């Protein structure tokens, strides 16, 4: 009986684990990143790209995106999906293509009953670097520092690190204190931590 009580106590002290899948949608190259959250610590589980540049049929591309995202979900069993929303640029056709890729990835998550969270590119960049206008290279470099990713593990495609950035942005938005992550301080975080000093 004593053993079982100690065992339960040990299990209750084990930090909960959560897997966040991040996706940077694209019809030519779609990036994905898997973030493992153990208690208050986040680490990269995997990242990569779905390269569709050799596929010329638009609808076949969408079908392959759906199949591959389903495969990634089945492989890593994410608890949540964080996906980058299409940005409003001057090229309407490009925005529509990105919207289709995003919709198919979302459909795959819905099929596997994975909760979905959408973030604007500016929001993701702001969360990672403190600058909403940061370049893809700056986002990648900051993620390497925050998650201790070896340079040789970073893919040549920045779509993968952009996807990982979406996952990390969601991790921050889920309650990780800003001051311990390298993310910019916010007034909301200050008020929460110093309620006695705000009147």
Image: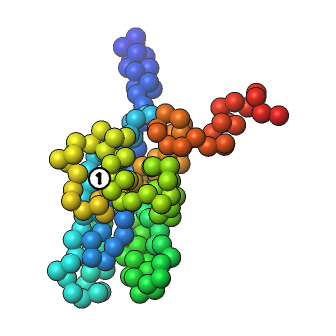
Q: Is residue 114 above or below residue 40?
A: below
Which is nearer the eye, 3 or 23?
Answer: 23
**How is the structure coloured here?**
rainbow
Quarter residue 1 falls in: top left
Q: Is there any visible trace of residue 198 in the rendered image?
A: yes
Residue 121, image x and y in percent? Answer: 47, 63
The extreme right residue here reads 199
Residue 115, image x and y in percent? Answer: 47, 59
Residue drawn at (30%, 69%) of the image? 30
Quarter residue 65 falls in: bottom left
Name the element at disc 1. Answer: helix
The extreme top residue here reads 2
Quarter residue 198 falls in: top right
Left or right: where does residue 161 sit relative to residue 131?
left
Left or right: where does residue 196 sit relative to residue 119?
right
Q: Is residue 170 above or below residue 17?
A: below
Residue drawn at (70%, 37%) of the image? 191
Residue 75, image x and y in percent? Answer: 25, 55
Residue drawn at (49%, 33%) of the image? 180
Left or right: where does residue 103 sit relative to residue 193?
left
Q: Is there any visible trace of residue 112 in the rendered image?
A: no
Rendered-image quadrant of the C terminus = top right
Q: Is residue 138 above or below residue 16?
A: below
Please name the residue that numbered disc 1 is placed on.
76
Label 1, residues with CA under 10 Å away: few <14, some 14-19, many ≥20: some
Which is nearer the eye, 87 or 33?
Answer: 87
Which is nearer the eye, 138 or 164?
Answer: 138
């Amino acid at each position: 009986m004593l053993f079982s009580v100690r065992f339960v106590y040990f299990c209750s002290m084990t930090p909960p684990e959560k897997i966040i899948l991040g996706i940077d949608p694209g019809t030519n190259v779609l990036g994905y990143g898997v973030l493992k959250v153990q208690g208050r610590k986040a680490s990269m589980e995997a990242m990569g790209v779905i390269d569709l540049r050799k596929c010329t049929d638009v609808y076949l591309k969408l079908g392959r995106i759906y199949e591959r995202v389903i495969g990634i979900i089945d492989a890593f069993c994410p608890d949540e999906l964080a996906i980058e929303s299409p940005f409003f640029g001057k090229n309407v056709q490009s925005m529509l293509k990105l919207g289709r890729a995003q919709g198919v990835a979302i459909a795959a998550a819905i099929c596997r009953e994975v909760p979905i969270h959408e973030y604007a590119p500016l929001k993701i960049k702001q969360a990672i670097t403190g600058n909403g206008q940061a370049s893809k290279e700056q986002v990648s470099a900051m993620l390497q520092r925050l998650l201790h990713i070896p340079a040789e593990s970073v893919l040549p495609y920045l779509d993968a690190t952009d996807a990982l950035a979406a996952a990390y942005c969601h991790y921050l938005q889920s309650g990780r204190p800003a001051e311990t992550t390298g993310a910019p301080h916010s007034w909301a975080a200050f008020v929460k931590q110093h309620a006695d000093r705000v009147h």
